[in-house]
């Protein structure tokens, strides 16, 4: 007799000889475990966790988020991860035909084609980007965020100016659920919603007591 057959026979004997209460307990535990797992997966899908300052994003992700907030603050339309002259760039300013890249090889290649390109070091603050762009940019407050970026963040979440923290939290959860790429939403919209939430979270945070 083969090993699987012997194993199956032993298991069948155990099932026949085990007390009914034990079999019922094992079955209920299995059903309960699958139910809990299903609830956790559904909850995570329906209610994605809000981004927090302690999340472990890479330096590249943080720099991209800062640049997105800066470009939104100066009301400059852009496309992310665009292809220009056969090279992928981090951002392409649609109305200016200006590319922003972290890749020196892409920068020099695009420059040779006659198009405008800006090379950004990963450690450069996003607020300094305005000094490198080949056009005049508005002056922003320190940190690259002014009232216009805060108003834009409220608009992204569909909120009136001055909405309280609870309203911001509710709007974020509703909008991010709709834009979740796993549910057929747009990655670009998903990122904008997260950036808007972070902008408002920082703007509405109470200053530390002195």
Image: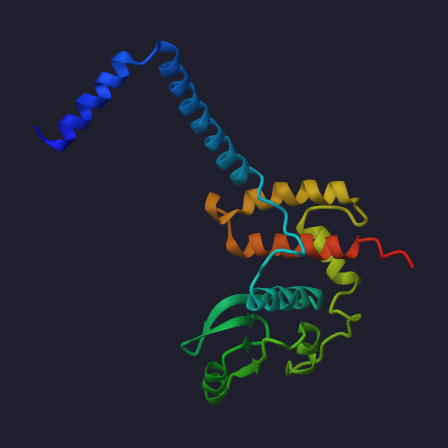
**Residue, x 74% and y 41% (percent of image)?**
167
Question: Residue 88, image x and y in percent?
Answer: 45, 73
Q: Nearer the viewer, residue 45 or 168?
A: 45
**Residue, x 71% and y 80% (percent of image)?**
136
Residue 208 figure quarter: bottom right
Question: Residue 65, image x and y in percent?
Answer: 61, 64
| Residue furthest left in the image | 1
Side of 80 where 174 appears, left or right: right
Q: The C terminus is located in which quarter?
A: bottom right
| Residue furthest top in the image | 20
**Residue, x 7% and y 28% (percent of image)?**
1
Question: Residue 83, image x and y in percent?
Answer: 45, 72
Question: Residue 92, image x and y in percent?
Answer: 54, 72
The colour scheme of the drawn protein is rainbow
- The answer to whether 131 is drawn above or below residue 34 in the figure is below
Side of 163 where 188 appears, left or right: left
Q: Which of 180 and 34 is in front in this view?
A: 34
């Amino acid at each position: 007799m083969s090993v699987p057959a012997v194993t199956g026979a032993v298991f069948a004997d155990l099932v026949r000889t085990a007390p009914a209460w034990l079999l019922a307990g094992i079955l209920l535990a299995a059903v309960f475990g699958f139910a809990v797992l299903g609830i956790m997966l559904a909850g995570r899908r329906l209610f994605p966790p809000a981004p927090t300052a302690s999340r472990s994003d890479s330096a590249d992700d943080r720099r991209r988020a800062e640049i997105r907030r800066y470009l939104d603050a100066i009301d400059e339309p852009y496309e992310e991860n665009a292809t220009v002259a056969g090279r992928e760039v981090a951002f392409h300013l649609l109305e200016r035909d200006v590319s922003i890249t972290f890749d020196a090889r892409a920068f020099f290649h695009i420059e040779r084609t006659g198009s405008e390109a800006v090379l950004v070091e990963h450690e450069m603050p996003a607020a300094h980007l305005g000094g490198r762009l080949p056009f005049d940019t508005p002056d922003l407050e320190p940190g690259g965020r002014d009232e216009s970026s805060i108003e834009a963040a409220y608009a992204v979440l569909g909120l009136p100016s001055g909405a309280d923290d609870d309203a911001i939290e509710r709007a974020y959860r509703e909008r991010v659920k709709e834009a979740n790429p796993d549910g057929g939403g747009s990655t670009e919209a998903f990122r904008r919603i997260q950036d808007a939430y972070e902008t408002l979270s920082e703007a509405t945070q109470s200053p530390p007591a002195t």
